[in-house]
């Protein structure tokens, strides 16, 4: 196997791709109708039968699925295959409610790993690479997904999982890891640790594939500079298999969606109406090939834009911009929409690392909004007056980005608890 790049698919002309999607959609709707009574009922409520869906042009007729449906149908209600034909379960962390359970046949696993393999190849991966997978293994899809993709590409795959930074760095140095896969916050943490220990010359990473949480362009540049690598974004949802639904190529201007397996739509989150390409709205996915968990028109809550502008890499798959935030992550503070990613952007612009925590509470019917930020190591020895000045500057910068005032507290470096999987950025005490 020379390479997992699949140009016959990934650079397919649009009309051919559309034809492939039409065929797969018709088949998938029939599969769901026959095997998922929960969704069949939703179709029946709209007076639909599978015959009403003849091509992608009819997609908009189908009912949406939401997180609430996943909760209602928990755990097995949206399964498209009998348990005896499924081979694996993954699950979300359940931080925003009940866990989502997703199921896979062996065929589903194969296709998912193909998608991850494409992402690794797009990041420059070949069978010569040592793929250092520091996503969590287990229920979380990150570890197993990139791991499977690594095998397909033929990389020497290292299932590190997250945590134990000393061991991560030791293995990276001893084994000559060349591609790092983990969450961006963990990549930033590893980069910081490499610098502190003066290991830059001993680490030979060339690329990173980072996803599973929101990160800004500034954070990308920071990680790239610190590690001397190219950092690629990858996107996915457990509900749709995991990482690899879309991935970045060398152009780094959005993530190509694996359109032979997924149809993406952008809708108005309030009306559900499909919006034209290039308009900002909520991302909706239809899985075309998944057997065990075949979601149709699943609303992701991610706010984003699609673009079919020609890409220099030659891939014809539509590109999605980095999601501007999940409507789930969005905080409403004093009536204003605040995304943690906006705060991160301000911090990076002001020269801070993305180590922060947002604390929101309600006192006397009014929201309090505090951002704790770790000082840079050189600031730590500064006078109190200097620190106070820095806090004041951050207050101003945040106010101009968000439109509301936050209290800022600079704290000692490394004093904010880091989770080595997904970062806990927000503590919303109004919900407790
Ligand atoms: Zn491209």
Image (spheres, helix red, strand yellow):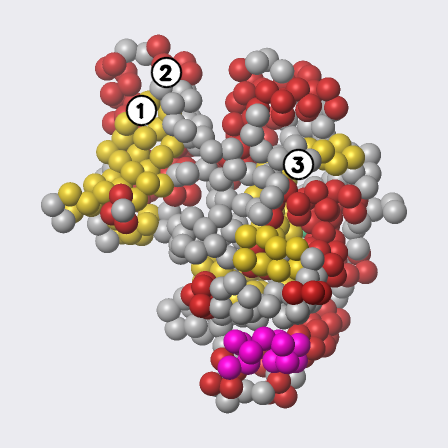
The span picked out in magenta is: 30-41
In which quarter of the view is residue 320 placed?
bottom right
Marks 3/1: CA–CA distance: 33 Å
Q: Position of residue 94 (x, y in %)?
A: 45, 51
> Label 3 crowding class (10 Å Cα cut-off): few <14, some 14-19, many 20+?
many
- Dominant SS in magenta: helix
Q: Is residue 377 magenta?
A: no
On screen, 360 above or below 104? above
Q: Which secondary structure lies at badge 3?
A: strand
Labelled disc at residue 161: none
Q: Are marks 1 and 2 in contact (CB under 8 Å)?
A: yes
Q: Residue at x 56, y 18 (%)?
A: 195
Q: Residue at x 54, y 58 (%)?
A: 101
Work out whether mark 3 precedes mark 1 in sequence or the reverse, and give the earlier one.
3
Look at mark 1 in the image and give the residue it sits on. 410
Evaluate whether residue 108 shows in this view. no
Whether residue 190 sits left or right of residue 244 in the image: it is left
Q: Are marks 3 and 1 in contact (CB under 8 Å)?
A: no
Look at mark 2 in the image and give the residue it sits on. 379
Q: Nearer the viewer, residue 154 or 386?
A: 154
């Amino acid at each position: 196997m020379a390479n997992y790049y699949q140009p016959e698919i990934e650079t397919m002309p649009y009309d051919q791709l559309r034809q492939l999607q039409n065929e797969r959609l018709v088949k998938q709707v029939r599969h769901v109708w026959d095997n998922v009574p929960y969704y069949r009922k939703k179709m029946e409520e709209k007076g639909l039968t599978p015959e009403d869906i003849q091509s992608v042009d009819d997609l908009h007729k189908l009912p949406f699925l939401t997180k609430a449906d996943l909760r209602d149908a928990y755990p097995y209600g949206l399964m498209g295959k009998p348990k005896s034909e499924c081979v694996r379960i993954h699950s979300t962390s359940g931080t925003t409610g009940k866990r989502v359970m997703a199921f896979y046949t062996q065929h589903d696993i194969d296709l998912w790993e193909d998608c991850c393999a494409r992402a690794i190849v797009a990041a420059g991966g070949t069978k010569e690479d040592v793929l250092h997978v520091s996503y969590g293994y287990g229920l979380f899809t990150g570890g197993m997904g990139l791991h499977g993709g690594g095998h397909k590409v033929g990389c020497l795959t290292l299932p590190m999982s997250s945590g134990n930074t000393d061991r991560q760095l030791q293995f990276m140095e001893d084994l000559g890891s060349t591609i790092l896969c983990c969450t961006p916050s963990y990549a930033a943490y590893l980069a910081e640790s490499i610098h502190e220990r003066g290991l830059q010359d001993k680490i030979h990473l060339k690329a990173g594939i980072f996803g599973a949480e929101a990160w800004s362009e500034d954070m990308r540049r920071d990680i790239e500079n610190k590690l001397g690598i190219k950092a690629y974004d990858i996107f996915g949802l457990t509900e749709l298999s995991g990482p690899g639904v879309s991935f970045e190529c060398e152009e780094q201007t959005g993530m190509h969606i694996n359109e032979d397996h997924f149809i993406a739509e952008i809708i108005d989150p309030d009306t559900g109406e499909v919006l034209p390409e290039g308009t900002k709205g909520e991302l909706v996915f239809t899985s075309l090939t998944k057997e065990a968990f075949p979601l149709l028109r699943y609303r992701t809550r991610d706010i984003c834009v699609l673009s079919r502008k020609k890409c220099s890499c030659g891939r014809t798959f539509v590109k999605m911009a980095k999601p501007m935030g999940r409507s789930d992550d969005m905080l409403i503070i004093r009536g204003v929409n605040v995304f943690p990613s906006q705060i991160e952007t301000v911090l990076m612009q002001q020269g801070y690392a993305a180590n922060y925590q947002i604390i929101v509470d309600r006192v006397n019917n009014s929201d309090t909004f505090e951002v704790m930020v770790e000082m840079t190591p050189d600031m730590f020895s500064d006078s109190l007056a200097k620190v106070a000045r820095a806090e004041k500057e951050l207050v101003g910068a945040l106010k101009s980005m968000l439109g509301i005032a936050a209290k800022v507290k600079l704290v000692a470096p490394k004093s904010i608890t880091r989770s080595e999987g997904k970062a806990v950025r927000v503590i919303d005490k109004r919900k407790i």
